[in-house]
Image: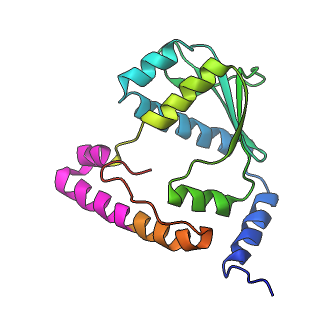
């Protein structure tokens, strides 16, 4: 008799939510705009990342997971902007894992999702470099808003929570829990 995870009901819940009513287009656009602002905020802290993207200006990368997608165009400043509707993508990146629960477990383990890439190899290489080298220093941003001590307490607490979640998710996936980085949160 096969045993089933006690959390398998979450998979069905995620599937029902994803198949349910879709958000209005204006909401999708606003969320995408906020994602672009966050990406650019992080990129502006890494001059080398902006310089690498500058060489790719005008190119469009389309990222897709299930029916959700976002097309990003590289600006002349070496940042991202939403591509115009109907823009032809130079690079298509598709996250192939359909399960949001499996994606969340992989993220907690520190694993990158499985992706399928089509298109410009050079642009793909630059995007891969960004994924490998650019990290958001949340603690530094919090310190600007709240001061060093409160930011450190919040970041330390967040790292402990992430480590606990990773330890909880690791046995479900049959892997050891990874250590959460000291400074940069995923």
Report the predominant secondary structure element of the magenta stretch: helix
Q: Percent position (x, y) of residue 183?
A: 30, 49
Marker count (numbered)? 0
In the image: residue 82, left or right of residue 181: right
Q: Which colouring convention does the figure follow? A: rainbow
Please state the extent of the stretch shown in magenta in the rendering.
139-160
Residue 10 quadrant: bottom right
Q: Is residue 87 positioned above or below 65 on the image?
A: above
The quadrant of the image that shows the N terminus is: bottom right
Seen at 63% across and 56% down, the residue is 103
Q: Percent position (x, y) of residue 65?
A: 72, 45
Q: Can residue 56 be seen in this view?
A: yes
In the image: residue 100, left or right of residue 44: right
Report the front residue among 175 and 54: 175
Seen at 54% across and 34% down, the residue is 36
Q: Can residue 37 be seen in this view?
A: no
In the image: residue 174, left or right of residue 133: right
């Amino acid at each position: 008799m096969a045993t089933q995870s006690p959390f398998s009901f979450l998979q069905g819940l995620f599937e029902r939510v994803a198949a349910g009513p879709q958000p209005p287009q204006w909401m999708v656009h606003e969320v995408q705009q906020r994602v672009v602002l966050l990406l650019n905020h992080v990129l502006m802290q890494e001059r080398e990342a902006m310089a690498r993207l500058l060489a790719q200006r005008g190119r469009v990368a389309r990222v897709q997971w299930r029916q959700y997608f976002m097309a990003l165009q590289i600006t002349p400043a070496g940042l991202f902007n939403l591509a115009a509707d109907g823009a032809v993508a130079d690079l298509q990146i598709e996250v192939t894992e359909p399960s949001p629960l499996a994606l969340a477990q992989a993220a907690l383990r520190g694993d990158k999702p499985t992706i399928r890439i089509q298109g410009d190899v050079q642009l793909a290489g630059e995007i891969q470099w960004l994924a490998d080298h650019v990290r958001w220093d949340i603690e530094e941003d919090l310190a600007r808003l709240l001061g060093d001590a409160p930011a450190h307490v919040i970041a330390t607490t967040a790292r402990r929570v992430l480590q606990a979640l990773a330890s909880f998710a690791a046995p479900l996936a049959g892997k050891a829990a990874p250590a959460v980085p000291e400074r940069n949160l995923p």
